[in-house]
């Protein structure tokens, strides 16, 4: 009988994927996006130690079936029997699925992210530690802001002011405001309404979703120079942002955020080398999982750049708290992200207080799945 730690002996015996989908209460409309449903994939890695690592990832309705098929047909056969502790080796094995030249690499990257996220949970459970503690983070809580401020067809400005009040009542003292779908002057008015309703100590980031030209981005920052914006996210169109983001950053003086549209740490590195960003919000669900996200965080640390996880608070809050340059945590209100509030059975009824989220102390990602809710929203 081996006297080694259970983590060193544990092996993967099964990988389970469960697609989930639910219609949101209203459509979320930004400059270059329109979402009517929240969907995700719950991935479970079963081990011969009796521990099940699990996590849910993504909101890619059109890619969901392809991602699950790749996990089941292509990745799982490579991973059965692998040591759970060999997370770097497993990451390299699943990375091979991104190599075929004519393949849509987004599918392979999201599949890899599902595996990697569940594997981190299994490791945390096997050693009995939350991921942020396992990564070296000593924080017990994290300050949060909410993604919101989506465009409304009617009463947009009144709705924004009410949304600020709703956020505060819910315990959240920050908003990442959706912009880029209107002219810079119109969107500046939206930002002004939020700042006036919220006050100076309220986090106010703005996200144009790559909706503006360089000139429009500069126009917006000039109009809003007295609003004390905490950051401006992806203000310029995607095709030349490497050159244009540094100009917006240097001319405006507003902190710039980008990285969620990058697929690898190398793309994030290029943004940092170009002096284009102050905050990197690489998405671990889109770009290879927490393993790749942590590499981005370490890389960003050497450039003096802060990091956040783009959405996915079920693991993003712990990840941001687990690295020294972690910034705020990004969440959404229940209508936009029902899974965070209803799929996690041990989620407190009032998870935020004075703008702060207290991190779970249970091992792994700290979540217990509500099986009844899971069965009500699964689509297979």
Image (tube, rainbow, N blue to C red):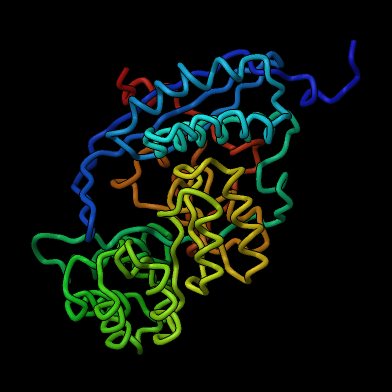
Could one spot residue 182 in this view of the protein?
yes
What percent of the width, then of the height, locates residue 44?
Answer: 53, 23
Q: Is residue 363 above or below residue 250?
A: above
Residue 105 in the image: x percent, y percent? 41, 38
Name the side, left or right, on which 198 lies relative to 51: left
Residue 243 lies, in percent from the top left, at 40, 73
In this view of the protein, can residue 342 be seen by the observer?
no
Q: Residue furthest left?
A: 154
Q: Residue at coordinates 17% horizontally, 70% vertically from top-left?
A: 182
Pick the quarter of the image with the C terminus: top left
Is 62 positioned to the left or the right of 80 in the image? left
Quadrant in which residue 324 is drawn: bottom right
Q: Quadrant of the N terminus?
A: top right
Out of 285 and 96, give the one closest to the viewer.
96
Residue 25: horizontal and vertical position, in percent?
Answer: 21, 43
Q: Is residue 15 left or right of residue 239?
A: right
> Above or below — where is 219 with respect to 262?
below
Q: Residue furthest top?
A: 1
Q: Give the mark count.
A: 0
Residue drawn at (55%, 34%) of the image: 95
Give the residue furthest to the front.
101
């Amino acid at each position: 009988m081996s006297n080694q730690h259970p983590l060193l002996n544990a092996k993967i015996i099964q990988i389970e994927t469960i697609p989930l989908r639910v219609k949101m209460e209203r459509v979320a409309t930004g400059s270059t996006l329109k979402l009517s449903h929240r969907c995700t994939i719950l991935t479970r890695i079963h081990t011969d130690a009796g521990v099940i690592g699990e996590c849910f990832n993504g909101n890619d309705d059109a890619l969901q079936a392809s991602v699950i098929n790749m996990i089941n047909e292509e990745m799982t056969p490579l991973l059965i029997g692998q040591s759970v502790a060999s997370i770097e080796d497993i990451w390299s094995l699943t990375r091979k699925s991104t190599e075929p030249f004519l393949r849509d690499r987004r599918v392979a990257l999201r599949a890899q992210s599902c595996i990697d996220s569940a594997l981190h949970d299994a490791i945390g459970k096997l050693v009995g530690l939350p991921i942020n503690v396992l990564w070296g983070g000593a924080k017990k809580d994290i300050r949060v802001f909410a993604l919101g401020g989506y465009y409304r067809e009617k009463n947009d400005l009144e709705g924004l002011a009410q949304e600020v009040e709703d956020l505060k009542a819910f315990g959240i003292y920050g908003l990442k405001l959706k912009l880029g779908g209107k002219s810079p002057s119109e969107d500046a008015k939206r930002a002004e309404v939020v700042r006036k309703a919220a006050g100076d100590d309220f986090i106010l980031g703005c996200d144009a979703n790559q909706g503006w030209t360089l000139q429009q981005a500069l126009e917006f920052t000039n109009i809003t120079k007295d609003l004390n914006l905490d950051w401006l996210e992806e203000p310029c169109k995607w095709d030349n942002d490497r050159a244009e983001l540094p100009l917006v950053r240097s001319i405006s003086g507003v902190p710039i955020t980008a990285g969620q549209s990058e697929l690898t740490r190398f793309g994030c590195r290029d943004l940092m080398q170009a002096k284009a960003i102050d905050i990197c919000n690489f998405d671990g669900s889109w770009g290879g999982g927490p393993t790749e996200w942590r590499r981005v965080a370490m890389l960003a640390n050497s450039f003096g750049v802060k990091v956040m996880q783009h959405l996915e608070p079920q693991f993003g809050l712990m990840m941001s708290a687990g690295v020294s340059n972690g910034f705020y945590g990004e969440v959404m209100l229940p209508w936009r992200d029902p899974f965070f509030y209803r799929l996690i059975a041990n989620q407190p009824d009032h998870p935020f207080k004075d703008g702060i989220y207290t991190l779970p102390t249970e091992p792994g990602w700290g979540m217990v799945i509500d099986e009844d809710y899971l069965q009500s929203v699964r689509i297979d």
